[in-house]
């Protein structure tokens, strides 16, 4: 990964959505109508969620490039980001509404999400702000892919470490893959990108990005960096809402990396932050504080990443032994 000693800040470029969340007994099957219960709105969007996680859970100086409509939906998004300490570079659109997401949250903490991108589609290559003081650029795929690619290429040329959370899953341009230092995906996204299913180790080997991390929910995470595999077992919590847990992982990992953490402790911080995010409602409202992450790391230090947990995770990933 490329680093500049005088840089420590993170720039997140990506989406911001207002989440409309309804709780229900289960997520509807195709053609099924489910009678919901509680309803609430929460600030969300993968980019904004990850920016909040960088600043709040990771404790890193964070800026965000985002596009918002000129409407009331933008107000809670701006407030949430600023409350977390994120500096904003806003592209304001008058012909598109602020992005929204419609989420059904089931009693087992699983969810189904439909996104209306709205203003998020207005981000263009020329909107990338100056990268002075930026060590890491964090990207996702809820904004136009040509803009994402341009941001990555320009940042790489400037010596900035480029991190991509390839979600939602889609085919990635070669120019984008070639500009990445870190790729973070879940199991389904990894299979979609590589075409390799049922063998996580083989899928990770299929990619040439210097560091690839796959998040595995309650099992933990597996990374391949510089030809070596690294395993991180999951922290144990009682989940309430999994919305935004992956985003919290991405933000906390990028923050830890920007602050000089090596891969193993960065994975631990990200995993602890992601676990805590499942214990409360909302994507951004669920992001824990840096102190809460540190407390969980200390509390479960003796039980996470023990030999048995790592052996089980290695077997699931298709690794012959714990490495």
Image: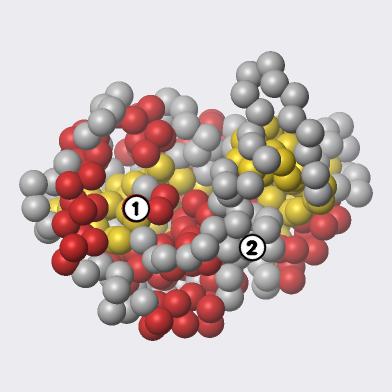
State which quarter of the image contains the C terminus. Answer: bottom left
Give how far across and how far down residue 171 sits, in percent.
Answer: 42, 25
Observer-nearest residue: 225 or 247?
247
Tell me if mark 2 has few (under 14), some (14-19) or many (20+) residues whose alpha carbon lies within 10 angstroms of its own.
some
Q: Which quarter of the picture shows residue 2?
A: bottom left
- Mark yes or no: residue 60 visible: no
Q: Is residue 75 above or below residue 172?
A: below
Task: Give residue 219's mark.
Answer: 1
Describe the element under mark 2 as helix, strand or loop. Answer: loop
Identity of the residue furthest to the left in this view: 320
Between the C-alphas of marks 1 and 2, the distance is 19 Å
- Please give the name of the residue rendered at 40% of the width and 81% of the height, measured from the top-left corner: 299
Q: Indicate the position of residue 109 as horizontal and vertical percent values.
A: 58, 49
Residue 247, compared with residue 188, is above or below; it is below
Q: Quadrant of residue 267?
A: bottom left
Q: Earlier in the sequence, mark 1 or mark 2?
A: 1
**Quick one: 287 or 251, which is closer to the camera?**
287
Q: Residue furthest top?
A: 31
The residue depicted at 21 percent of the width and 53 percent of the height is: 312
Rendered image: mark on residue 280: 2
């Amino acid at each position: 990964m490329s680093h500049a000693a005088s840089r420590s800040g993170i720039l997140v470029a990506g989406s911001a959505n207002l989440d409309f969340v309804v709780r229900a007994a289960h997520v509807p099957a195709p053609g099924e109508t489910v009678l919901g219960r509680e309803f609430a709105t929460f600030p969300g969007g993968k980019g904004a969620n990850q920016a909040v996680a960088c600043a709040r859970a990771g404790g890193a100086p964070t800026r965000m490039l985002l596009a918002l409509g000129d409407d009331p939906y933008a107000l809670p998004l701006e407030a949430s980001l600023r409350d977390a300490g994120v500096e904003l570079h806003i592209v304001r659109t008058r012909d598109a509404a602020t992005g929204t997401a419609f989420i059904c949250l089931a009693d087992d903490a699983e969810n189904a999400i439909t996104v209306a991108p709205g203003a998020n589609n207005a981000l263009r290559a020329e909107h990338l702000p100056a990268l002075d003081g930026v060590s890491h650029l964090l990207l996702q795929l809820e904004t136009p892919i040509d803009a994402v690619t341009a941001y990555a290429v320009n940042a790489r040329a400037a010596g900035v470490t480029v991190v991509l959370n390839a979600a939602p899953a889609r085919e990635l341009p070669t120019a984008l893959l070639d500009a990445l230092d870190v790729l973070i995906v879940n199991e389904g996204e990894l299979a979609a990108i590589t075409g390799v299913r049922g063998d996580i180790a083989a899928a990770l080997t299929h990619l040439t990005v210097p560091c690839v991390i796959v998040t595995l929910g309650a099992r933990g995470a597996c990374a391949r960096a510089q030809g070596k595999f690294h395993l991180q077992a999951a922290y144990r919590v009682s989940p309430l809402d999994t919305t935004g847990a992956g985003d919290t992982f991405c933000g906390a990992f990028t923050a830890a990396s920007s602050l000089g953490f090596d891969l193993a402790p960065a994975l631990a911080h990200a995993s602890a932050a992601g676990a805590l995010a499942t214990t409360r409602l909302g994507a951004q409202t669920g992001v824990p504080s840096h102190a809460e992450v540190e407390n969980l790391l200390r509390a479960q230090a003796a039980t996470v990443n023990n030999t048995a947990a790592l052996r089980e995770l290695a077997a699931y990933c298709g690794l012959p032994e714990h490495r």
